[in-house]
Image: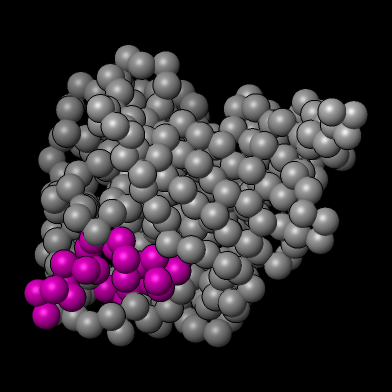
């Protein structure tokens, strides 16, 4: 079995490679070639923490496994992120462990890669302005991911804390080599955007559908529980609404569920899973002026596909700690 650390994930799991893995994973999801129990949360007594449990299988590559993620509230100065965990990948044929992979970096990369896949399939080819709401880890990953599939002339970020947003913009300017600007007014940032990624921890809407111009594509990423929604109902009703996995959306897509509860849409408002679009079965965009949404929730198939790709890379390129788990000598 290979043990693959955070630094190894960051070095070897490139965004183009991960986007390719997400394409295969999401097609498999929509073809029914996966097993995906809905994510479960277990509270940790006497703390504000909880553990998320995400098991699953995928047919190609034939593997199964589980992601364990510990979610704790931490100070900004903490060396640890809010999501700490691991992905365990097993071989389906023999039932033997293949790899244990640091989970926070893998999750961060695969989440942004899935949004990049959706943007490539749904966003208009010409993207003048990219707006990212939020200035945390996923905001950084999404800027890098969007640049892998589109070439915006303007990149702007918004955050609740203007000082933090300014520091983040400067950091991303240095990292990408492209000017990234912090915008203090969220409405201004949204109205000018062709491509938007929401990556905040907000439980209540921060973005209004009335602000969206025709042709905008939005990746809704930050909210992953039924009680949270980053955008108002107008964003849902005005858009061609696509998700990663219908059962997950009906369990945890707060933006959609609030709109359904209000009676403004039904569950049929989900026009496709992103895998159906990647598979060529459903159109991602039907007109240049259409507003499109990809609701990201994350499924274990994404972790398994990215994890197995890393395992294959580790075998080929000779990285990772080799551990023999099968000690028959007792």
Residue found at the far left of this picture: 262
Report the magenta stretch's main SS: helix
- Within the magenta stretch, is there residue 16? no
In the figure, is residue 150 to the left or right of 97? Answer: left
Q: How many marks?
A: 0
Please report the residue visible at 34 percent of the width from the left and 78 percent of the height from the top: 270
Please report the residue visible at 22 percent of the width from the left and 63 percent of the height from the top: 255
Q: In this rendered view, identify the residue nearer to me: 22 or 52.
A: 52
Please report the residue visible at 41 percent of the width from the left and 45 percent of the height from the top: 52
The C terminus is located in which quarter?
A: top right
Residue 70 location, x and y as percent? 42, 35
The N terminus is located in which quarter?
A: top right
In the figure, is residue 15 to the left or right of 215? Answer: right
Please indicate, yes or no, whether residue 113 appears anywhere in the rendered image.
no
Residue 95 location, x and y as percent? 77, 54
Colouring style: one colour
Please report the residue visible at 56 percent of the width from the left and 36 percent of the height from the top: 86
Please indicate, yes or no, whether residue 69 appears anywhere in the rendered image.
yes
Residue 225 location, x and y as percent? 28, 54
**Residue 15 position by quadrant:** top right
Residue 67 location, x and y as percent? 54, 45
Compared to residue 63, the image places residue 236 above or below, namely below
Q: In this rendered view, identify the residue nearer to me: 252 or 236.
A: 252
**Residue 268 position by quadrant:** bottom left
Compared to residue 81, the image places residue 68 above or below, namely below
In the figure, is residue 239 to the left or right of 152? Answer: left
**Residue 185 position by quadrant:** top left
In the figure, is residue 52 to the left or right of 276? Answer: left
Q: In this rendered view, identify the residue nearer to me: 71 or 290.
A: 71
Q: Which residues are magenta?
A: 239-263
């Amino acid at each position: 079995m290979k043990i693959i650390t955070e630094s190894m994930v960051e070095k070897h799991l490139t965004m183009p490679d991960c986007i390719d893995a997400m394409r295969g994973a999401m097609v498999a999801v929509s073809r029914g070639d996966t097993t995906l129990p809905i994510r479960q949360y277990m509270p940790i007594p006497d703390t504000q923490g909880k553990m998320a449990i995400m098991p699953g299988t995928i047919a190609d590559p034939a593997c199964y496994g589980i992601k364990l993620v510990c979610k704790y509230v931490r100070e900004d100065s903490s060396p640890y992120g809010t999501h700490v965990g691991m992905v365990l990948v097993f071989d389906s044929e023999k039932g033997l462990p293949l790899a244990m992979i640091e989970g926070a970096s893998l999750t961060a990369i695969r989440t942004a890669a899935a949004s990049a896949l959706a943007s490539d399939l749904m966003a208009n080819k010409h993207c003048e302005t990219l707006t990212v709401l939020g200035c945390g880890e996923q905001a950084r990953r999404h800027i890098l991911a969007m640049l892998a599939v589109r070439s915006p002339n303007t990149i702007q970020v918004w955050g609740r804390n203007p000082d933090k947003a300014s520091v983040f913009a400067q950091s991303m300017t240095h990292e990408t080599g492209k000017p990234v600007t912090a915008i203090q007014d969220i409405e201004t940032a949204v109205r000018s955007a062709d491509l938007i990624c929401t990556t905040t921890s907000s439980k209540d809407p921060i973005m209004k559908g009335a602000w969206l111009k025709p042709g905008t594509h939005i990746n809704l990423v930050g909210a992953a529980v039924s009680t949270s929604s980053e955008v108002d109902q107008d964003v849902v009703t005005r858009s061609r609404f696509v998700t990663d996995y219908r059962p997950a959306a009906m369990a945890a897509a707060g933006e959609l569920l609030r709109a359904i509860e209000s009676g403004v849409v039904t569950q049929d408002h989900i026009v496709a899973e992103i895998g159906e679009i990647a598979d060529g079965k459903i159109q991602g965009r039907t007109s240049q002026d259409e507003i499109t949404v990809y609701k990201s929730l994350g499924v274990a198939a994404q972790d398994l596909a990215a994890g197995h790709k890393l395992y294959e890379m580790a075998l080929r390129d000779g990285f990772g700690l080799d551990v023999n788990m099968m000690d028959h000598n007792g």
